[in-house]
Image (tube, rainbow, N blue to C red):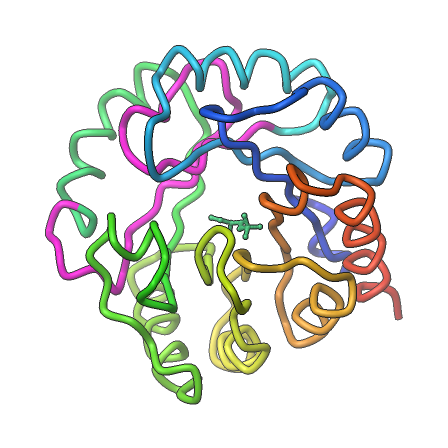
Amino acid sequence: MDKLSSGEKLHFTLIDPDKPGDLVKTAERMVEAGTDAFLIGGSLAVTPEEAGRTAKVLRRFGKPVIIFPGNLNCLTPEADAVLYMTLMNSLDPYYLIEAQVSAAPIIRKYGLEVLPAAYIVVYGDTAVAHVGRIHPIPAGKPEIVAAYALAAEYMGMKYIYLEAGSGAGRPVPPSFPQAVKSYTGLTVIVGGGIKSPLIAHEIARAGADIIVTGTIVEENPEAAASIVEAVKSAGRR
Ligand code: 1GP
């Protein structure tokens, strides 16, 4: 993450181990385009074997492989690190603290680097919102996201992931990363529904440090490659 301190914007490629497609081809294309890391995870149907197999293949490409866990089944010792997330706007104690407690001894045993992160799921009509029993955030209220971000920072977290939901019809409003940046020093990750270079550029310029794309990588690797370029150009002065 040293690149972040020099003002560079990062792009992470999300791979769902349940439907990795042609993993090697996808990874090659994204690395060539300049992606900075791989996230592996999904809300449903990922087995620990699939997570392990996917991480093992991706590690060959020399980029960090970070677990983005939908649940404990995504944990694998084959990855480098784990986004250790609290789903801040969940109504379910499982996603607020219980999963984290169950995961902690396993993460220690696996020797994974821990990236402490607040996870905010913005919209209510996505798979992650359903699984995580979330309380949606009104799109016109960036001050609510800023309050969550401040709380996360006061609790000692280092990252905040603003999530629209995989395949969401609309991405997170740019005013959200902007609000987080103006109130906190957290590293801001934004993902969900980002399908065009223009949107990716706008969200990065608004304050996102890291842009994540998953669906577009599966659907159209060439479009995903141009998103990487748009993210990188947002970090250039
Ligand atoms: C999902 O934020 C990620 O958790 C990526 O979303 O699949 O819509 O790119 P997409």
Quarter where residue 1 is shown:
top right
Quarter where residue 71 is shown:
top left
Left or right placement of residue 234 versus residue 10 in this view:
right
The residue depicted at 39 percent of the width and 76 percent of the height is 145
Q: Give the percent coordinates (x, y) of residue 69.
A: 37, 36
Q: Give the percent coordinates (x, y) of residue 215.
A: 59, 45
Q: Give the percent coordinates (x, y) of residue 139.
A: 43, 82
Left or right placement of residue 23 versus residue 111 in this view:
right
The residue depicted at 27 percent of the width and 28 percent of the height is 72
Which contiguous range is marked in magenta? 65-94
201, 109: nearer the viewer: 201
232, 107: nearer the viewer: 232
Tell me if residue 214 is in the magenta stretch: no
Left or right placement of residue 198 versus residue 111 in this view:
right
The residue depicted at 58 percent of the width and 27 percent of the height is 65
Quarter where residue 37 is shown:
top right
Residue 16, compared with residue 173, is above or below; it is above
One can see residue 160 in this view: no
